[in-house]
Amino acid sequence: MNSDPFIEELRALVGDHGLLLGDDMTPHLTGARYGAGRARCVIRPASIDEVREVVKLCVREGVRLVPQGANTGLVGASTPDASGGQVVLSLSRLRGHCEIDVANRSVTVDAGMTLWALNERLEPHGLWFPIDLGADPSIGGMVATNTGGTRLVRYGDVRHNLMALDVVLLDPPGELAHFGSALRKDNTGYDFKQLFVGTAGAGGVIVRATLEVHPKPRQSATALVVPASDEAVIALLEALERDLGDFFSAFEGMSATAMRAAFEHVPSLRNPFAPEPVPDFAVLIELESSSSPQYTGLELQETLNRFLEAHFDTLVANAVIGDREELWALRHSITEGARRMGRPIAFDVSVPRSRMMDFRRAAGAMAAARFPQLVVVDFGHIADGGIHYNLIWPADAAVAYDDATVAGLRDALYAIVVEDFGGSYSAEHGVGAHNLGYYAKYTSATGKRIAGGLRAMLDPQGLCGTVDLSAGG
């Protein structure tokens, strides 16, 4: 047994299976990309009541909590610091409740359930939660980071699909608060649940969520399209929304280096434009419909074909109407392919989509001029203004990887994003230890003052989460 009385009190609350110490904590201490620390222990409650009791104990003892879902985040928001004094509060065992209301098209689910598991439960009802990601995050983590994904242009992000939240508060310690309901229309005051969306656990522990779910598509059509020019990219997007807006669901851009990274990583993938070379830029377009062709007579593949033919030469230089799984495999293989090229320096940014191609040119020119040893591998959600702008430091580069150089690159790129293009340094992944300095730099004094007031009310000791949004530190 551990000689630490606090640890033993935690053990009494959750049992031996719910408490991890020593090497057993390892998977919970390192993030998917950034964030690695030490923890006093990892606590894994199996019920909301257990979460409440753990929070009460930690508040009483003044111990900081780091809420953690599936730990798939990319900014270090769900991992402890190096002090060894924090408790990681893992919600991975809190996944027993899943109440589906088919007629209301809603589901109430525990925070620890993963996206894949939720969609597996929804499948027999012809429903899904359509936030499409390369990872398998927990629902609580998705709320805490306001996840977007490849189909945001059609379905919105988590915030737009969130109906209600259950949150365990720090003040009063352990109080279970319920915000919202399974109603789509309720204008009775402040929408308090939104205070916990995208704030990475600041102010309370998300334990349950009610989500709007959607009919699963019955048919889809996918194409990989080479725009006629840079200017044609956004013009093509506008035409899709104008002419096929009821079916338009994805518009994913990929540079030539991004596509080559995927081809080299996954030998089974082929260049769909062969024998022509990989184009400088291509867009993965998808249409979806939940309507039955039996009643509408609509065949999406024919619809997409006609659209592309109508815009050949003006907006479209080439197009491949391919196998859906194969084309999406190309898109989803880019990240791992980029890692194989060297050491990635990853950016998840957004700009007004009307300026996306201008941003790519400006960022590429800056990188080529100041950091010529790096290779740009960029791809992302052009339709919502988001882009994963990765620069790879090749292992065989003449100049060795240098932390100070990388810090300078981050400063330079974020200055272009935020100052020159009015964009965001964190389009999807939220704020964590990794990008907290940029939060401090780019968040207004008014915003931080209001965040400080909220924190003082919800978490007066500042015990929950990894970041202080009132100060950026």
Image: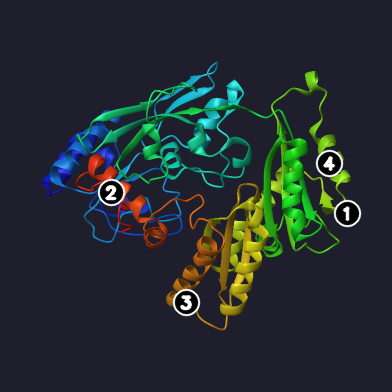
| x 62%, y 61%: residue | 378
The Cα atoms of the two marked residues, 1 and 4, are separated by 12 Å
Q: Quadrant of the C terminus?
A: bottom left
Residue 381 at least partly seen: no
- When the figure is inspected, residue 452 is found, relative to residue 390, above or below; the finding is above
Label 2 vs 3, first from the N-terminus: 3
Q: Amino acid type of disc 2?
A: Gly
Q: Which mark is residue 313?
A: 1
The mark closer to the camera, 2 or 3, is: 2
110 vs 14, nearest the viewer: 110
Q: Nearer the viewer, mark 4 or mark 2?
A: 2
Please name the residue shown 55% across and 26% down the image: 122
Q: Amino acid at mark 4?
A: Phe
Q: Quadrant of residue 213?
A: top right
| Chain-order first, disc 1 or disc 4 | 4
Q: CA distance from mark 2 to mark 3?
A: 33 Å
> Residue 452, labelled with which disc?
2
Task: Name the image colouring.
Answer: rainbow
Q: Earlier in the sequence, mark 4 or mark 2?
A: 4
Please tell me whether mark 1 sits on a helix, a strand or a loop.
Answer: loop
Residue 405 disc label: 3
Measured from the top left, where is residue 307 in percent x and y? 84, 41
| Left or right: 86 in relation to 124 | left
User: Which residue carries the number 4 mark?
Assistant: 307
Residue extending farthest front: 446
Q: Residue at x 19, y 36 (%)?
A: 173
Please provide percent x and percent y for residue 168: 28, 34
Q: Earlier in the sequence, mark 1 or mark 3?
A: 1
